[in-house]
Amino acid sequence: MSLIHAIAGSVANAAGGFSLGGEMWEQLDHATPADDTTDVTFTSGGSASAWSGYRDLFFYIAGKSEQSTGETPICFELNGYDLATSSNRQYYNYRFNNGVKGSSFTNFEYSNIPAGTGSQYSQNFAWVAGVSGDFSGVHCNTLFTLFDINNNKTKYMRVSGYTPGLDTSTSAQNVHDYEGIWTWYGTGGKNSSVPAITQVNFFCKESGHEWGDGTVISLFGIKDA
């Protein structure tokens, strides 16, 4: 059984926890943002159990966008730091594959160690397609893992996902597949005294873009065996 199949098949019973590969997974929170929502925030204090009791966090995102066409880029922030005003930002290495009907895949790779501020420095870690039109019944799936969240060192995150989209200029189907790794050095910018992760905020970066009905975000905590 694959990892994602095991998770999807166990969500209903996850409140009591379930074992997977020698580890204990427990569902900590769940969100279904309504239309017109731009931000979805998860906190340790608002979860079923405090995050201090878990080694890793895992988010399963089945996303929709309020946009009628095109896609909405999604960013994230940690511990409530506003990337638009703070230099407390994530650094990333990111690979993006774009498949267009009738042509070959195109690969892009992005990396940054930015010197400025702004939400672009969390990059678009995920994309979600519109709630109407050709992809009205399709969710965009993203798996987002934050590793070893309670140590005092650099934090590492990994994202994997895909988004079906529509190229309005050619009316051809696109499939966006993305893989990325982020590091977060905390307030000091060094590999020491980095705070534990206690809040994760997912937000729609582009002006006028919003989460759409049908979005589901589930948070799991992973304990050591």
Image (tube, grey):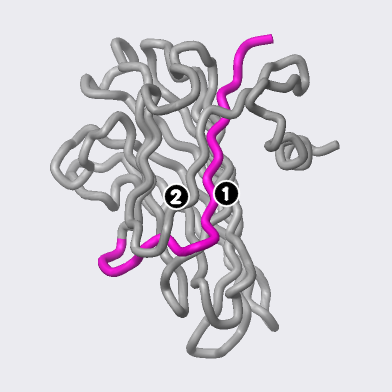
* Percent of width and height locating residue 10: 74, 34
Q: Is disc 1 in contact with disc 2, using a CB cutoff of under 8 Å?
A: yes
Looking at this view, name the residue that lies furthest to the bottom.
170
From the viewer's perspective, is residue 110 above or below residue 130?
Answer: above
In the rendered picture of this protein, how many numbered marks are placed on residues?
A: 2
Amino acid under label 2?
A: Phe
Residue with the mark numbered 1:
142
34 to the left or right of 104 = left
- Distance in Å between CA atoms under marks 1 and 2: 9 Å
Amino acid type assigned to the residue bearing label 1 in the image: Thr
Q: In the rendered structure, which segment of residues is drawn in magenta?
A: 206-225
Residue drawn 18% across and 36% down?
Answer: 87
Quarter holding the N terminus is top right
Q: Secondary structure at mark 2?
A: loop
> Camera-side residue: 42 or 186?
42
Residue 86 circle label: none
**Quadrant, the C terminus:** top right
Residue in the picture at 18% in, 47% down: 84
Q: Please tell me which residue is depicted at 40% across the width and 46% down the height of the picture.
A: 111
The mark lying in front, picked from 1 and 2, is: 1
Q: Is residue 180 above or below residue 183?
A: below
Q: Which mark is residue 125?
A: 2
